[in-house]
Image (cartoon, coloured by chain):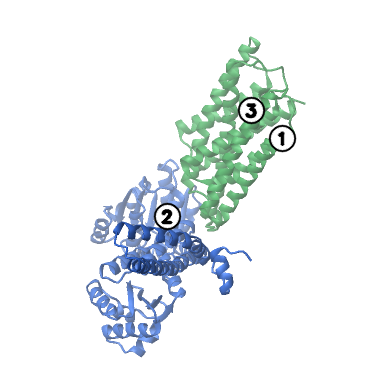
Amino acid sequence: MYFDLALLACVLSLLHVTLFFFMGHKKLELTANLFALLGLVLTTIQYVMLYKTPIPPFESLTGVLLLLSMALFIGYFAMYIKYKRPSIGLFVFPLAIIFVMLSRFSSGVEMAGDSVVVTFWLYIHLPFTILGTAFFMLSTLTGVMYFIQERQLKNKNFGIIFRRFPPLDTINNLNNTTLYIGFYTFTIGLLAGVVWMFYSSGRVNFYSTKLVFALITWIIYSSITFYKQFRGMSPKYTALSTIVGFISVLVTYVGVAFFVMG
Amino acid sequence: MQLAVLGLNHNTAPVEVRETLAVSGDELSQIYAEIMQNDRIYEAMIISTCNRVEYYIVTDDFLCNIESVLGIVSEHCNMERDQLRKYTYIHCGEDSVHHIFRVASGLDSLVMGEPQIFGQVKESFEACREFGGAGTFIRKLEEYTIKTTKKVRTYTGIGENPVSVSYAAVELAAKIFGNLKSHNALIIGAGEMCELAAKHLVTSDIGSITVTNRTMEKAEKLASEVNGNVLPFENYRENLKDYDIVISSTGATELLVTKDDAKNAMAQRKKRPMFFIDIAVPRDIDPAINEVENVYVYDIDDLKAVVEANKKQREKEAVKAEEYIQQGLENFYGWLDSMKIVTVIKSLRASFEDTIEAEVQRFAQKNKVESKDEMVKMHYLLSAYMNKVLHTPLKNLKNKSSEGGKYTLDEAMKILFELED
């Protein structure tokens, strides 16, 4: 039941943020946020409920996808509190809907690999990796927003997108913030994952598909962040690199979840 | 009692007439005194701005009393009544309340949605209180006008999109840089458009402003007005890199900033964006600069397009604003209706209390009751009885009056006393 309620809350939050985008009523913004909050609460309850099922959430695809949608909501609220720009919800909520739906339909599907050894490090690894991934998604979405708004300004289109999207500089800040948060949390998650692997199997298997893909992702994002930090990168290139970087994340997760799992 | 308004504005009267009728601060007290001399005008208020002069009166007979106000105005500005009539409009009752809500919200302004009028209306209400024009009606009108206007300004975008070229330029800069606090602007030229743009930049909290102009004195004058710096005209090219926003409006016939200038500046800016606004005709800034990455160029036609788009947006928002105004109107008239009931209730209770008093006196005389205690007890008993008897009908009267239903006398009695068929 919580799945359906969570899905409903996500759909309503998307509906309200879309109406806000076109109509501009402040009450619609508030309502969209309230539904998003409800969506977060309901997905959290559903995640906790998964502990009562035969496959615990950290071993099931359902759990991972639910955690990802929760992380997206958390990311959205973190950015909303800092920048007060609800239009990012137009991009985030559809993703949350997709993940909640996928987790609903993947109910009972176990993740590939050996059964998971539960240690303290698993509880660090999983949430941080997922949160990092969610922030990478957010940085990609803000990268897309940057290009859309940049085109509006260059082509002098003064329509609704121009008016409702945040200023270019704010989108760039959103892009940077989500990129850095994503990178730091993903790094913590990756390190914790390596430690967890060592504790659970007595060695670190560098040929593990998950680890290889995660390392590829980390290398790409670390290149972006280090290059940006030390050499400087224009807002446009940052936006572009976050989009390109995310493709690697897609390969990691979609690849691991569906292709390797068989 | 109803509200009526006699007024003229930018739509009905040319500026010569408006300035003749404008009421200065010194004249206000005299005009208020003249209007309030009329016994049948209970309350009055005057709004006088550069685009409108309006006289609001609270009266029973608006036709006669508006004529009397017209007489005062015509005497005051030495203009024949008939001539004055050509430029004025009159609203009464709900229309006049609707009108003041529209005026305060900026819907009736020359520049739709401009915010200054709200402050001017508030000042007019203050002056009205100061000069003795305000009573219960106008005080309540003030409260509802403020409430309605705040709703309109908060819940609609009526004031969000700038509709002047210079302000639109600054808003565009904000659309690129967000907060302008940490950004620097260079103004090339010192004409009127530059001055307006510079002033808008200052109100938008720009980090710093630098002015450059061929005539140094003019640059210095403008810089001092906006608390900015001055840059010698011959040095502006090599210093372009230091500015995020460049606004140019000069009479130069050749391009002042070329694509190469922009490229050189960008090379030194570590790709931080730059925004050029060209308000000059012929243009000062090469439009090809827009092709340079992270550089945005807008000329006067682009700004006019922004203004046109914003005007259309404000017109859309005005439709929303009308809904809030209608709500405000209903609330105000709800209060007015409740006031009528309060008067009825007060007179009913007063009549009952008089009867109790008379009956107690009559009973005391007839039965020779001299003890004050006894009289007080009788009075208390009858008052308690009165309260009990009146409680239900008065409660129903209050509740039903706001619904505005029409009933026959027997239906009304049944509703008031909750009688069963």
In green, which chain?
A: A
Question: Where the N terminus of chain B falls, by quadrant?
Answer: bottom left
Tell me the kind of residue under disc 2: Phe
The residue at which mark 3 appears reads as A48
Q: Are marks 1 and 2 in contact (CB under 8 Å)?
A: no
Give the structural element (helix, strand or loop) at label 2: strand
Give the structural element (helix, strand or loop) at label 1: helix
Above or below for A160 versus A41: below
| Label of residue A104 in the image | 1
- Whether labels 2 and 3 belong to a single chain: the reply is no
Tell me the kind of residue under disc 1: Arg
In x, y percent, where is residue B157?
48, 59
Residue pictured at 45% horizontal, 30% vertical: A230
Give the structural element (helix, strand or loop) at label 3: helix
In x, y percent, where is residue B136?
35, 67
Q: Nearer the viewer, mark 1 or mark 3?
A: 3
Q: CA distance from mark 1 to mark 3?
A: 14 Å
Residue found at the far front of this picture: B367
| Label of residue A128 in the image | none
In this view, the residue in front, B392 or B29, is: B392
Question: Where the C terminus of chain B falls, by quadrant?
Answer: bottom right
* Subunit that carries the residue with mark 1: A
Tell me the kind of residue under disc 3: Val
The residue at which mark 2 appears reads as B276
Q: Are marks 2 and 3 in contact (CB under 8 Å)?
A: no
